[in-house]
Image: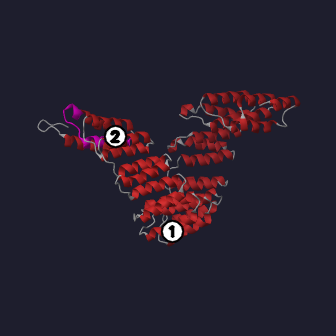
Amino acid sequence: METSTCPPGIIQYSCIIDSLCKRKRFVEALKLFTEMKRKGVSPNVVTYTCLIHGLCSIHSWDEALELLSEMHARNVSLNVHTFSILLDALCKEGRITEAESLLSLMIQIGVTPNTVTYNSLIRGYCLLGKMDVARKLFDSMVDQRCTHSVISYNILIKGYSENKKIDEALSVFHEMCNEEIVPSLVTYNTLIIGLCQAGRFEEALLLPYEMKSHGLTPDISTYNTLLDALCNNTKLDEALKFFDSMIDQGYTPSVMSYNILMKGYSENEKIDEALNLFSKMSKNGVNPNVVTYNTLISGLSHAGRLEEARMLSSEMKSRGLKPDIVTFNTILNTLCKNGKLDEARSLFNTMDDDGVVPDIVTCNCVIDGMCKSGETDDAYGMFLSLSSRGLQPNVRTYNIMIDGLCKASELDKANTLFLEMKANGCSADEITYKIMVQGFIRAKQTTRAIEFINGSLNGNVWADMKKLLNGCCPPMDQKILSSSN
């Protein structure tokens, strides 16, 4: 960047470093930073702050802290803005102890914290669930001559709401109003979410009307939050009334609004109502997205209406929408559960053509389908190929495969896989143990089942296994069972 007639100075270097950081070109920014120091141009607070802000944006906290230490060592004037950027980053990462140390250093060298600084720390305590500490810090701001902003209140209200203390959140809201600080849209949306999560829907439904009294207009996010809460709590009649009231008040439901209501219907075995809504959606000029189709495909699949689900998948493509992993997994799961393994294999093989990489859920579906169709060898082959696909089997994968082997009377292989599972760091769950014990019982190897239980289990899981064995054991084994554990 140097010319023969006009070598760059601090302003030029700082501007270019700032520009590089904003474009996420941090390696180049740091090289230029090193170059300027080598050429005798001393970085100032602006240069350092640009780099610290950039490093924090990519979660390079330690490098950012090193730069702050370098600033202090070089006697570069530190300001509240630089400290606040780093404090905010540390608090969001949950590194509250380091943030507290930074605050102490800040005060020690004579930099006065401002509202932004305190807001970051309050948010950090809220994220860790330390609401008492957050509240004390909030109250101490007045003693430090720091004014509470609407953001300060919003952070505290959100903290209480997310920590299931909605009454405290409402109390802070009333304090805010008494202090004549006008609540924002964020304030109300946060309270609506908190009230809905607490099951206090009637109070939540009143808030959009109260918003209007403060000169605020509820946005589509406000309505979608309420709609989602009603659907998640199976209040579908109320959700539909609320949806219709949105339209009556002049709001145009978004694709998300339709998706929320369709999901509510689909998950509550009302797929025809979901399809009717889908039809209205198109007539009202709202274009469906991938989530819309996935929701309907899932609902139709669960209702056993596989052909309609597949037709929607084809329609989705004709609209220029690409099926994603959720689309494939939903249809594959339904095909496998209905014994249509050849169709499932065919669909699985087309995933690459659509640019969709199978995940562990996909493979679990196919392995399960193979096991249930008696194709245990093929299932085991696919299980062994998981690592070459870059996939790690989870407890569900192991349970499917162990169950398939047990039902195929390959108990030794199942037991080996059980031991491998533990060696590979995947913890067996209660289902795994039940599968193994049931496998031994099915093969009339009750003594081996008891040995397996005594070698593997204790506590409540053992009691459940003992119930499985009662009545299955011959007299001699019953004596062993009653004396066990």
Q: In the image, which disc is placed on residue 105? A: 2
| In-front residue for pair 254/433 | 433
> Magenta segment, principal secondary structure?
helix
User: Taking 98 as reference, is 339 left or right?
Assistant: right
Q: Which residue type carries mark 2?
A: Leu
Point out the stretch of residues depicted in magenta: 35-58
Do the residues under discs 2 and 1 have CB atoms within 8 angstroms?
no
Residue at position x 64%, y 39% from top?
396
Q: Position of residue 101 (x, y in %)?
A: 38, 39
Can residue 443 be seen by looking at this rendering?
Answer: yes
Mark 2 or mark 1, whichever is nearer to me: 2
Q: Position of residue 469 (x, y in %)?
A: 80, 36
Callout 2 environment at 10 Å: few (<14), some (14 to 19), or many (20+)? few
Q: Which residue type carries mark 1?
A: Met
Q: Position of residue 226 (x, y in %)?
A: 53, 62
In the rendered view of the protein, which quadrant contains the N terminus? top left
| In-front residue for pair 58/90 | 90
- The residue indicated by pointer 1 is 246
| In-front residue for pair 204/231 | 204
Residue at position x 37%, y 44% from top?
87
Q: Secondary structure at mark 1?
A: helix
283 w.r.t. 465: above or below: below
Q: Is residue 55 magenta?
A: yes
Q: Quadrant of residue 79?
A: top left
Q: Is residue 292 magenta?
A: no
Callout 1 environment at 10 Å: few (<14), some (14 to 19), or many (20+)? some
Residue at position x 64%, y 28% from top?
420
User: Taking 299 as reference, is 219 left or right?
Assistant: left
